[in-house]
Each structure stands twice: as structure tokens, then as C-alpha cells.
Image (spheres, rainbow, N blue to C red):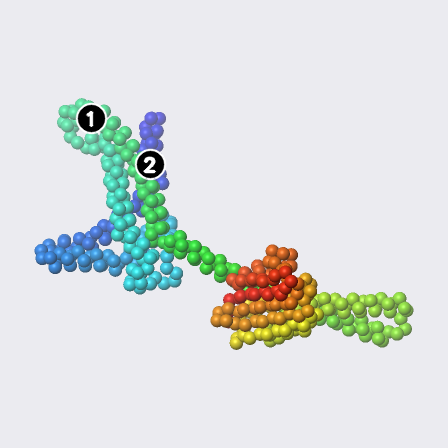
Amino acid sequence: MHRTARLRRVIQRPFQGAGRPVAFIATGVLIQLGVLLVIALPWILFVPVSKGAILLAVLVPCAAVLAAGPLLTEVQYGRFRTRLGVGIPSPFPGRRPRLRAWLRSPAGRRQLTYHVLGGPLLALAAAFVLLMWAAAVVAVSVYVWIWLVPLDWRIDHPGYSTWGAYVTAAGIALLHAASWLSGALARLDTRTATDLLGPSRQEQLARRVEALTESRAGLVDAADAERRRIERDLHDGAQQRLVSLAVNLGVAKATLGDLPEDARRVIDEAHREAKEAIQELSSLVRGLHPAVLEDRGLDAALSGIAARAPIPVRVKVDLPSRPSPTIEAVAYFVISEALTNVVKHAEASKAEVTVERFGATVLVVVSDDGVGGAELTGGTGLAGLAKRVASVDGTLSVDSPVGGPTVMTVELPCVP
């Protein structure tokens, strides 16, 4: 009894988990048989005799297979998805191209290679594995077949029991081999189809780069929108409350003349602190996102920076149309930080800012007549500016020989 149960487990083990691979390779054989039927159909219906008829019998089915290439691809996608749960992505973004464009495209030629070469070879191997399954099942059940033959045959062949044991053992080994080959063939077919029916590695990398670019652009836009929201909240909330507090303290200082000197001194100090807090908050709000930039554009915002600078700053903005808000914000903050660096480190007597558009590029040039020696790797904040420019696929370069002058050039993609 124990031996019988053990033998049953040995026989059943190859069938565990083999259902999906076997169904998968069997479906592949059926698909290739359909293609083979289309190619052989003219020879089944009639026998070509003349050279023209033979040529037509060969060319017409092949042309039909070529024309059915996209349909065969969809059928294979469905086979991998339903039988193995493997989703092979399409190499074509959006809708599949027309037949002529499909045949001319590298992805279409790869798919055609699978249908004409890879698929038939794999189907041939799959047919061999299925025959192994059939032979293994027949061999394992040899005793059933023996007991179905007449009794006279068994009497005339007294050694059938021993030979049946050998055949059963061979059938069990064949079952294990067929099970392993089914899984290996399914994996090989999956790898081949992924390479030929799906996007190539270059196409996958291009899609990944595009997706990352879109994601990064979304993050930059979201960060800019968040800065605008914070600027509005500070301007309309905290700043207005501080202004109201300063006004009330000013009124109290002007009207309450009979207060003790200590109380007046406290009110004066509170009034001064409130006005300084308003100035600091105004600078903070302007640094987050100046309202004039959103309302009147880059020219007016840069003119405000130039007016507040302690050195003369000449500003020239020549933009036929406003770029996207994100590009405007990057240009504004880069120029603002660059002028701050000029004032702090360059020891310059004047500076110049030029913003122009050349095709699809916004060119920003900030120059000064200072001592020079600025480097992107230095501690002047230029590395941070370069990262901010790179966040929108822009470039930043600095030409700053020792002794000056310093010229910082920024190129930003112009997105209207």
C-alpha cells in the first residue's frame, strides 16, 4: 500500500504546475498550424501545374501571412496574457501604425521575424514536447493497455509483466522530462517574444526617459504652484495681520499720550518690530514668487530687482511672447541669485542682464565688471543655480577669468 501511494506521487509530480505551460505551448502549435494551413491552402484546393500558378500559390499565401502580421501579434499577446499571465507591451506608442508603416518599422520587422522564424521553430519544439507527453502517458498506463488485450496474448507472452515495469519506469522518466521541457520551452518562448514582439531595449530606455522627463516636469510645475500658494497665503494672511498690528500700534502711540514712559517705550519697540517683520515678510514673499512676475511678466519683475540693487543694473528683455510660468520663474530666480552673488562677491561697479529668445530657447546673460574668478564648483551658489536650470532641461555656463569680467549664460527651453 505504501509503495503504491509513493508510486502515485512520483507519477503525479510532473503534472503539478505543468497545466499552464502545456496549454500555452499547445496554443502556440494551434496558431502555427493555422498559419501553415493558410500557406498550404492553394495546394489543398488544387495542384498548380504551370509556373505562374505555382508562383501564385507561393506568393499569395505568403502575402496573406505578411498582411496578417499585426493580427498575429495581437493573437500572440492574448496567448501570453491568458495562458501565462505575461503582458508584453506594444513597441508602438499609441495606436498601431498601418500595414505599410508597420512593415517598414524596426518593431514591425522584429515581430515579423517572430511570426516567420521564431514562432514556427518554437511550435515545432512544442509539438515534439506534446508528443513526449502523449508517449509518456501511454507508457505509464501500459498495464491498462495490456489488460485490454486478449487473455491468449498474455498467456503466450509470459514476460509481459517485467517488460511492462520497464516501460512504466521509462514513462515516468519521460513524464518528468516532458514537464521540465514544457516549462523551459514556455520560458524560452516568453523571452523570445518579449525581445521580438515587445519594445527593444533602446525603445524601453527612450520611453523611460520620456516618462521621467514628464514626471520631473510635473514635479517642477507642482513645486512652482506650491510656492505661489504659499506666497498668496503669506501675502493675504500673515502679512495683512502684521500690517494691521503695525497700524494699531501706530495709532496707539499717537493717541495715547498720557501713558508712562516705560509703556510708550514698549509700544515704540513693538511698532518698530512689527514694521521690520513686515519688511522681512515682504522680502520672503517676493523671494518665493513675486506677484509682479505673475501679473506683468519677466521684464517688470527684473526691473524691480534692478531698482533695489545697490549697484547700477541695466536690464534688457526682448521676448515676443511670455514663456511658461515655470520657465519664467526659473529665469527670475536665477537672475535674482546671480545679481545677489555679484553684489556680495564680485566687487563690481555695474551689471547687465539680457533676456532674449532665439527659436525655442530663452537666452539669459548676466555680466558684471567685477574681479572674476567665479566657478561652478565654488561656494558662490552657482552649483545650485546650475541644478535649478537643469531641472527644466536648461544649461548654465560661467566665463569668469581672474580679474573679470564675469559672464553667466543660461539657456532655457522656451515652452509658450
Report crowding for label 1: few under 14, some 14 to 19, many 20 or more residues within 10 A (C-alpha): some
Residue ID for mark 2: 14
Left or right: residue 122 versus residue 319 is: left
Report crowding for label 2: few under 14, some 14 to 19, many 20 or more residues within 10 A (C-alpha): some
| Residue at 80%, 73% in the rendered image | 250
> Marks 2 and 1: which is nearer the front?
2
Question: For the residue labelled by badge 2, is the local secondary structure a helix, a strand or a loop?
Answer: helix
What separation in Å lies between label 2 and label 1 (alpha carbons)? 26 Å
Dividing the image into 4 quarters, which one contains the N terminus? top left
| Residue at 87%, 69% in the rendered image | 264
Which amino acid lies under the numbered mark 2 shown in the image of this protein? Answer: Pro
Q: Nearer the viewer, residue 164 or 77?
A: 77
Residue ID for mark 1: 160
Q: Residue furthest left?
A: 49
Mark positioned earlier in the residue sequence (2 or 1): 2
| Residue at 61%, 67% in the rendered image | 367
Q: Is residue 93 visible?
A: yes
Residue 316 x %, y %:
59, 74
Q: Nearer the viewer, residue 54 or 413?
A: 413
| Residue at 52%, 76% in the rendered image | 320
Residue 188 x %, y %:
33, 44
Q: Nearer the viewer, residue 250 or 395?
A: 395
Residue 227 x %, y %:
61, 65
Residue 283 x %, y %:
69, 67
Which amino acid lies under the numbered mark 1 shown in the image of this protein? Answer: Tyr
Left or right: residue 406 versus residue 30 is: right
| In the rendered image, the vertical position of residue 175 relative to residue 334, given as above or below | above
- Determine whether label 2 and label 1 are within 8 Å by CB: no
Left or right: residue 176 versus residue 361 is: left
